[in-house]
Image (cartoon, helix red, strand yellow):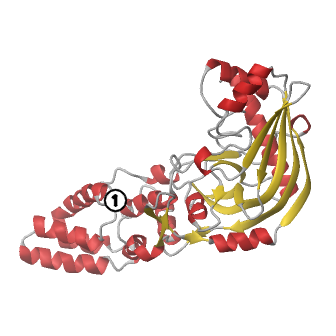
Amino acid sequence: MGTDVEKAIDELNAKWRNYLARIMGMDPTGTFQVAQGALGLSAADSSGLFTMTDAVPPDSATGYYDPSSMNKRSEAYRNLLYALQYESASDLRDALGDMYTKWLVFKNKWIETNPLDDQVKIFTAFANQQLDPIAAKRAIGVFKKANLDPLGHAIDEYLDDKNKQEFSDSAGNTYSLYKYIPSIDTAKKAINTGATIENIEFTASKEDSKLKHTFAQGAASGFYNIFSGEAGVSFEQLNTKAATSDIEIKGRIGKYATIAVGPVEWYDSSEVKRGYNNKDDFNVWDPNSDLKWDNFFSQPNGSLARYITEFLLVSDYDLTVTIHASFSSEEYNQIKTRAKFGIWPFFSIAATATHTTDHKHNEDGSLSYKTTLAKGLIQIWGVSFQNAP
């Protein structure tokens, strides 16, 4: 896709973001981001909410969310805990002497393959392998005391299964996710008492693409297409034609609402702040870890550089996207059969899509794309995020 087309879609995404911020009361000057991708929430459980909240949002006005490729906050947080040192590390250093560095190397190698093992178990294995029995017993006692300090408590909470919830997929396979607030019941209650917008009237040529907040990566993340589907030169030409035309979105949103989101007991913000506030301090950071301050907190690509604080939820909508270009019958059929993952801005993953779609080739050659979401089903259309810590 050429630079001019990418710029056109950047501006289009920014316009849609600004329009939604205005009509839904989101902060246009802050870090409100339009979300695209697999955004449908299951009506039966909280898995969709937990998966989405665990995503580390890109620093952009539009973010594409795909569970298979998203950076996970829970995994980045685990890596941070293992990259920090205990506040009482000096006692352990005194007990181990020259063996302290070997302990850090041993721990780092162990957690590469067993990241969820108990810390006392790891240290006990090290002590019994590397120290004589008397020194090992003394060192294990010191470590158990050190493990009671805030970092040790944070690691224990992270490893505790009570802070995870099991779910089942459509094939009956079970998997666990770290818990967040709110639950699906809270989301349902919020959307049931939400507001209605009777007239959605977005016309790209009439909207402002200027962003009052400066995003590090521009107005888009991951999607520079109008049609998402199979690759090929002819399909790129259709994307180019669509991107350089005017686009309208009209219709109705039956319900929308916002909900605050965040982690529960498995996440200790004080340990995150301790790491954040002590850049390159090796009394806080493990000098033998491959991960340093920049890996977690540098903007825009640190694994904990941002986190989601709020969702914009929608339900019960009926919307029509019209692309005012002149498409031939052949081009229309090509789009209809090959745009498998949607048309801007309603991209999704086919297997998890909750909305239904219908295409129409209009008399003037333009393309209309109708998308509906039934009452009772919920999607996430946007997020608000904050920068670390």
* Residue at point 41%, 52% (across, down): 292
Horizontal and vertical percent position of residue 176:
45, 65
Task: Kindly state the secondary structure of the residue where label 1 is placed.
Answer: loop
* Residue at point 21%, 80% (across, down): 141
Drawn side of residue 35 relative to residue 280, left or right: right
Horizontal and vertical percent position of residue 331:
75, 22
Horizontal and vertical percent position of residue 39:
65, 53
Drawn side of residue 48 relative to residue 79, left or right: right
Drawn side of residue 55 relative to residue 1, left or right: left
Residue 27 shows up from this direction: no
Q: Which residue was labeled with disc 1?
A: 286
Along the line of sight, the residue nearer the viewer: 95 or 251? 251
Along the line of sight, the residue nearer the viewer: 327 or 333? 333
Horizontal and vertical percent position of residue 138:
15, 79
Q: Quadrant of residue 106?
A: bottom left
Classify 190 as above or below 196.
Answer: below
Q: In which quarter of the image is residue 314?
A: bottom right
